[in-house]
Amino acid sequence: MTTTPTEAPGTSEAAAPATRFLGMLPTDPLLARLSLFTLLNAFGRGLFFPVSVLYFTRVIGLSATSVGVGLTVAGLFGIAAGVPAGRASDRWGRRPVLTGLWIGCGAALVAYTVIGSYASYPAFLCTAIAYAALCQASMGVRNALYADVLPPGTRVEGRAHLRMVTNVGMGVGGAFGALALQIDSRPGYTALILLDAVAFVGSALMVYRLPGGAERRSVADAPAESRWRAVRDLPYLGVTFLNAVLALQYSLLEVGLPLWIVGHTDAPRWSAALIMILNCALVALLQVRATRGVEDLPGAVRAMRRSGLLLALSCAVFACTAGLSPLWALAVLVVGAVVQVLAEVLSAAGGWTVGYGLADARAQGVYQGVFNSGQAAATMAAPALVTATAIDHGAAGWAVLAALFVVAGLGVGPAVRRARRDTWRGETAVD
């Protein structure tokens, strides 16, 4: 069975997502349109992330514990939403489904602004579940849309460009969010949340006007066993799991490293913010370059293998910062952060290639829903895992994380070979 992803009408393998002005302005009209809605959507999310927890606690009046429990429950619903949303996009088209999901996200954000007191906790929980489910579901559908409209030969490079745009949008939005935190008032928080809602609706309208991705997918006419094949495709689930293990690095940077810096090193507390800024800047500069040679499955396997080894090295570097003087600790943290960025851009590029390349094109939405749900599950599990290892046990905990990354990186090759044999029988083996 050949399952090479189908091309969108009017695209070709020769088309390239070329860019100008330091890679920020695409010369390809389609990539430019994708970049616009990606930038707007990322800007809105960047506004919301810094202020959300403080809005729930300081403005609505919920306790930190109740917010944490509520967001965890909402995250579970988010993980579960990916596959049915992907199935819906396989049946009714990417653009209509993604448009509806993003409009729903905007509506959920508006609902947040009318929750008034602790007595409204059930309303908060319902809204949080709706927002998490809609947002998480939209990610898999969005990735399936990319599979439809970007030519297969340049799909990974296009994804890399869009990730760069996402980083820029999140960074700019986060800067405005920081201003709202400084003002610390209900009107300021509410204005940013409503602006994020507008960004979701604006992005949805841009998506709906995209060419391609609206037609009813052929999977609707396929046998029933093909429609949900992704949830029973054990080789693909194995690759999804290993990719999720590598994705633990994001929470390692966002949650584990700040806790490590404050509790186990003498580095300045602002080091965590510096490393996050450095990460965003380097990802924006390196992500497109990192896709070179990762356009096929053998290249993706090599990239993810190297990513696992580099992540292990970054864990060792971070562990060495305990006991150093403030300046030396800061310098070593920066070195570890640079190593981690190299691993991040490689694992992202490799993950896109295997996620698309091993999927059944007749059910791309369901496959991308499964793949994205794996990453979402890793995001939920990572804070507890990082705390139980590196934060609680120091160097020994870092060693456990390093071993986990090495095993995942080295395991991608055998897992991809098995999945490829199951999907493309008789093709050249992955090296």
Image: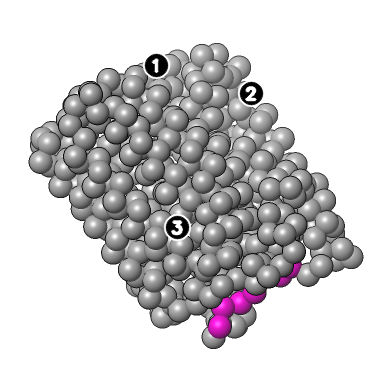
Name the residue nearer the viewer: 195 or 166.
195
Can you identify the residue that label 1 sits on?
263
| In magenta segment, residue 185 | no
Can you identify the residue that label 3 sits on?
163
Q: Secondary structure at mark 3?
A: helix
Q: Can you give x and y, in whole percent of width and height, for residue 304 in the image?
A: 66, 48
Amino acid type at circle 2 is Val
Check the picture and name the quadrant holding the C terminus: bottom right
How far is disc 1 from disc 3 in space, using C-alphas? Answer: 32 Å
With respect to residue 111, does 298 lie above or below? below
Q: Would you say residue 5 is visible in this rendering?
A: no
Q: Can you give x and y, in whole percent of width and height, for residue 101 in the image?
A: 41, 56
Q: Answer with the quarter of the image where residue 204 lies.
A: bottom left
Of the residues tagged 1 and 3, which is closer to the observer? Answer: 3
Callout 3 environment at 10 Å: few (<14), some (14 to 19), or many (20+)?
A: many
Q: Can you give x and y, in whole percent of width and height, for residue 15 in the image?
A: 55, 81
Can you identify the residue that label 2 sits on?
400
Residue extent of the magenta highlight: 3-9
- Mark 2 or mark 1: name the one nearer the start of the chain: 1
Q: Answer with the quarter of the image where residue 24 lies.
A: bottom left
How far is disc 3 from disc 2 in space, using C-alphas? Answer: 30 Å
Q: Secondary structure at mark 1?
A: helix
> Is 389 left or right of 224, judged from the image as shown?
left
Amino acid type at circle 1 is Gly
Asked if disc 3 and disc 2 are in contact, CB closer than 8 Å, the reply is no
For the point 38% across and 75% down, the residue is 209
Callout 2 environment at 10 Å: few (<14), some (14 to 19), or many (20+)?
A: some
View extreme (bottom): residue: 10
- Mark 1 or mark 3: name the one nearer the start of the chain: 3
